[in-house]
Image: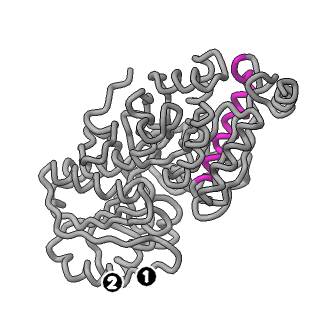
Amino acid sequence: AVTAVTLATTATGGRNAGSILIGISAAKTGILGPYDLQAGQLFQMRIDQINKAGGVLGKQIKVKWIDTKSDKPTAATNANELISEGAVAIIATCDFDFSFPAIQAAGAKKVPGIALCASSPKVATPAIVGPYGGSMGLGSDTEGSAMAEWLRKNKPALKRVWVVKDLSLEYSKATADYFKARFTELGGKVCGEDTFTAGDNLDLSSNVTRLRGAVKGCDVIFDGSWNPFGAQYIRAVRDAGINTPIATNASVNGVPVVQNNPKLSNFYALGFACLNTYCSGSKNPAVAKVNAQFKAKYGQPIGNHYALPGYELADALVAAIKKAGSTDGTKIANALYGGITINTFAGKMAFTQKCHRPQPAIYTVEQYTNGKDHQIGTWSTQKVPNIGDGSPCSGVPPKVK
């Protein structure tokens, strides 16, 4: 039996082989495909570059991706299959609900399971995802908090907000809840709240009717959803003749927003970086360089900044393997969550044992005018409020040197 396992891992790459296998259990297709596909491709592209530079621990890294097809149970099945082939880490979907089965399966085998960019605070909570789980996402809580802080600091006249919460994902619910908590903590007022549940054939007519009846008492609308549904909400509001400023999280950004709203104005979004595919005004040439490399490799530019953590995750995971000096899962997890400094497109961040995601969260602030997206600033989240959901990432984020 021992010989069989040794032969299997030697053939595919694994803990004891001449190469190191990293498995991806994420969506190439289905509803999460627009988030996972390019993020996973960026992960693979960066691993290829690392291999050309010599790999890690004197070994080349192999990546095997099994499509979840945006199916939750399949995520766990894929993870188990990849681990049986010798994978030393599992890269999971860019959403907590869809990544958790893979993260849980990996943790049960003492293998790190890390989401490409899942942002619910739950995916960074060791009590939920265990000592091996985490995400490269910066946190839906920090997204909501960052936009609230930026508005109160830079647009103080927008003090009455209509908060819309999409109930379809933990991510979208959290962006709305944390925005509301931080906005009111900083002296803002809530003029009204509404909800919808994203899905096929989404009908937003009743939401627009409720907004129309209250909008005169509001200065700004917070769109707590995710693409393409957040972009559809914006379209419904603007088609109703409501031109009130709209602010959102980091998901409702990029190409889908303009596709749904070609002339969109008076709209503010966050980004992990100002991606030159659709955003102008970036002060970071590294983003354009990576985008050009991606287009040369895959034939099209990066469509959404949410893909960028895939590239950064490759660096973070390889740094953890190097620091661990081993492909043992426990040692890799201890190294990653032990405070490795990560150079992201936004700046230096680090995971911690308490909060299993990069901190402090730094975002670009982008404004859409007549369908054109332009970076108008950056914002580092100052504080994440405690809303009683058990998040270990609440409070003032740690400083990273």
Give the left or right position of residue 21, taking residue 314 as reference.
right
Q: Main secondary structure of the magenta part?
A: helix
Q: Nearer the viewer, residue 50 or 5?
A: 5
Q: Residues within 10 Å of mark 2 (few under 14, many from 20)?
A: few
Q: Quadrant of residue 252?
A: bottom left
Looking at the image, do the residues carrying marks 2 and 1 touch, with CB atoms under 8 Å apart?
A: yes
Q: CA distance from mark 2 to mark 1?
A: 8 Å
Q: Amino acid at mark 1?
A: Asp
Q: Position of residue 52 (x, y in %)?
A: 75, 27
Q: Which residue is mark 2?
A: 206
Quadrant for the N terminus, please.
Answer: top right
Residue pictured at 34% horizontal, 45% vertical: 142
Q: Amino acid at mark 2?
A: Ser
Q: Quadrant of residue 162?
A: bottom left
Residue 118 lies, with reference to residue 176, above or below; the image says above
Residue pictured at 64% horizontal, 34% vertical: 89
Which range of residues does the magenta coloring cover? Answer: 36-57
Q: Which residue is mark 1?
A: 203
